[in-house]
Amino acid sequence: MAFSDSFFNRVEKRTNVGKDTIMDLAKKLQQNDLKNEGTLREVIQTLSKMTGRDVSKEQEDKIINAVVQDKVPKDIDKLI
C-alpha cells in the first residue's frame, strides 16, 4: 500500500513524527522477527520515544506477551 506525501504531512502535523522516521520504523518491522522479544522491546521503546508516551516495564511485558502468543487482533475493526 502506497501512502501519499499528504498522508505523511497530516501524520507529522499531529504527531511531530516525520516521514523518514515512519519509513525507517516500517522497514525495521519488515526486516525483523516480531516474535523476538529483543526486537519487540526495541520497537516499543522507539514508539514510546516517538510519541512522547512512557511505557512501563509491566506494560511492555504485556504487549510482548500478547504479540508472541498471537493475541493481537488481526482485524483492525477489533482494535477500534
Image (cartoon, helix red, strand yellow):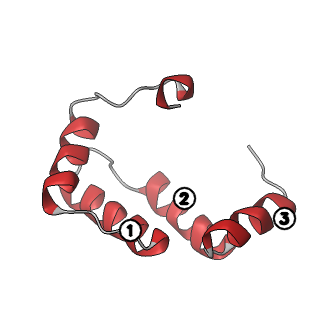
Compare residues 54 and 22 and report the one nearer the observer: 54
Q: Earlier in the sequence, mark 1 or mark 2?
A: 2
Quarter of the image with the N terminus is: top right
Q: Quadrant of residue 69?
A: top left
Q: Earlier in the sequence, mark 3 or mark 1?
A: 3
Q: Position of residue 56 (x, y in %)?
A: 19, 63
Left or right, 77 with reference to 58? right
Local crowd at mark 3 within 10 Å, few (<14), some, or many (≥20)?
Answer: few
Q: According to the image, label 3 marks what residue?
A: 5
Compare residues 25 and 62 and report the one nearer the observer: 62
**For residue 10, which numbered disc appears in the image?**
none
Say which element carries label 3. Answer: helix
Q: According to the image, label 1 marks what residue?
A: 53
Q: Earlier in the sequence, mark 3 or mark 2?
A: 3
Left or right, 49 with reference to 26? left
Q: Residue at x 23, y 51 (%)?
A: 36
Local crowd at mark 2 within 10 Å, few (<14), some, or many (≥20)?
Answer: few
Q: Amino acid under label 3?
A: Asp
Q: Residue at x 45, y 55 (%)?
A: 29
Q: Residue at x 48, y 69 (%)?
A: 51
Q: Amino acid under label 1?
A: Arg
Left or right, 28 with reference to 9? left
